Amino acid sequence: MTAKIQPLSVIDPDGSANGYDPGLSEQELLHVYRSMVAVRAFDEICLKLQRSGRIGFSIPNKGIEATQVGAASAVRKTDWIFPSYRDFGMALYHGVDPLEMMHNMFGNALDSARGRQMPVHFSFRDPIKFVSISSPIGTHIQQSVGAAYAEKLRGSDAAVLVSFGDGGTSSLGFHSGMNFAGVWKAPVVFLCQNNQWAISASVEEQTASVGFAVKGQAYGIPGVTVDGNDVLAVRKAVSEAVERARTGGGPTLIEAFTFRMGGHSTSDDPSRYVPKEVFELWEKRDPIQRFEKYLEASGLWTPETAAATLKEATDRVAEAARVAER
């Protein structure tokens, strides 16, 4: 599948960044990289835990790392995040300990939800305002608008980032949330992760419009389509939208065109509805490998760096799983 509207892109195939300066130090760029690798490590270990019957459920994140981490890098810890369940990276980027997330995966006594939520339904007050993930599709969208409007009434410059999948745009919450955000000029950034499948329903079965970003026009909200596998392009789009929100410009709808390289959840078999050649195509567009090219061109990455980063992330997540299970 290809995007119907040419998405914003920053990182070229050779690793250069089109002259765009993300405004990040070398250490911050490496933190972005480590966060993306940590998402994949967390994802893969959770899949193994579920397949071995040690946890009941998980949500694959492979292929969506750039969208999550790029967006997270554009908000402050004093802002609000209303995540979807495919947003491990937003928590990890802002310093949430994988152990705290694993407590939720096992639903143990140290789980922040005290076992009252399904696995993958994280919520944290510290180090960032990470509001509880909701299973009902789209219900958190209008909640995010309410939080954003409350911050506006307080005179705060805090912004709100709300994330949802392409399937979420078919929910009542999406349309009512967009409508009131436009009317109130609420400081909220809507991030649609267009991973092209709402469980087994394709985008073509989901909407007749040329994309999802254009839906903002009906509500007086500007829309932006971005390459969701380009972490710096996502950061650029979200940073500009957040700045607009902080300065009274109101909301923005961002469509991140990406692809989930796995099932909707561990209860799902994507091979039953996604053609094999589509997976093969998107494997070549791996967002982590793409960012590695950028870091290599900047002198910040080597194959040894990759191996060490993956080992560190895998060891940390595996240890978190062992502790949480005990």
Image: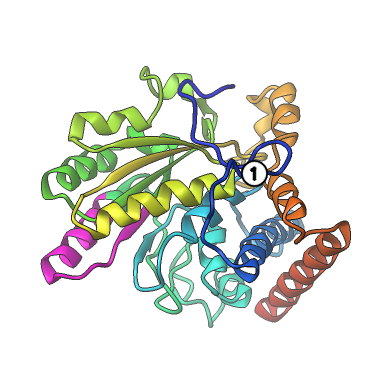
Q: Is residue 137 above or below residue 103?
A: above
Asked if residue 156 lies in the magenta stretch, the reply is yes
| SS category of the residue bearing label 1 | loop
Q: Is residue 127 left or right of residue 271?
A: left
Picture coordinates of residue 73, whole percent (x, y): 50, 61
Label 1 crowd bin: few (<14), some (14–19), many (20+), radius 10 Å: many
Horizontally, residue 200 falls left or right of residue 221, namely right
Q: Main secondary structure of the magenta part?
A: helix
Q: Please check the rendered image and state whether residue 75 is part of the magenta-colored stretch, yes or no.
A: no
> Which residue in the protein does label 1 denote?
63
- Residue at 25% x, 47% y is 251
The one nearer the camera, 78 or 97, is: 78
Q: Is residue 150 left or right of residue 282?
A: left
Q: Please state the extent of the stretch shown in magenta in the rendering.
A: 142-162
Q: x and y percent of residue 138 in the render?
A: 33, 45
The quarter holding residue 169 reads: top left
Residue occupying the point 79% across, 63% down: 310
Badge count? 1
Q: Quadrant of the N terminus?
A: top right
Task: Give the color scheme: rainbow, by chain, secondary structure or one colour.
Answer: rainbow
Q: Amino acid at mark 1?
A: Gly
Q: Quadrant of residue 28?
A: bottom right
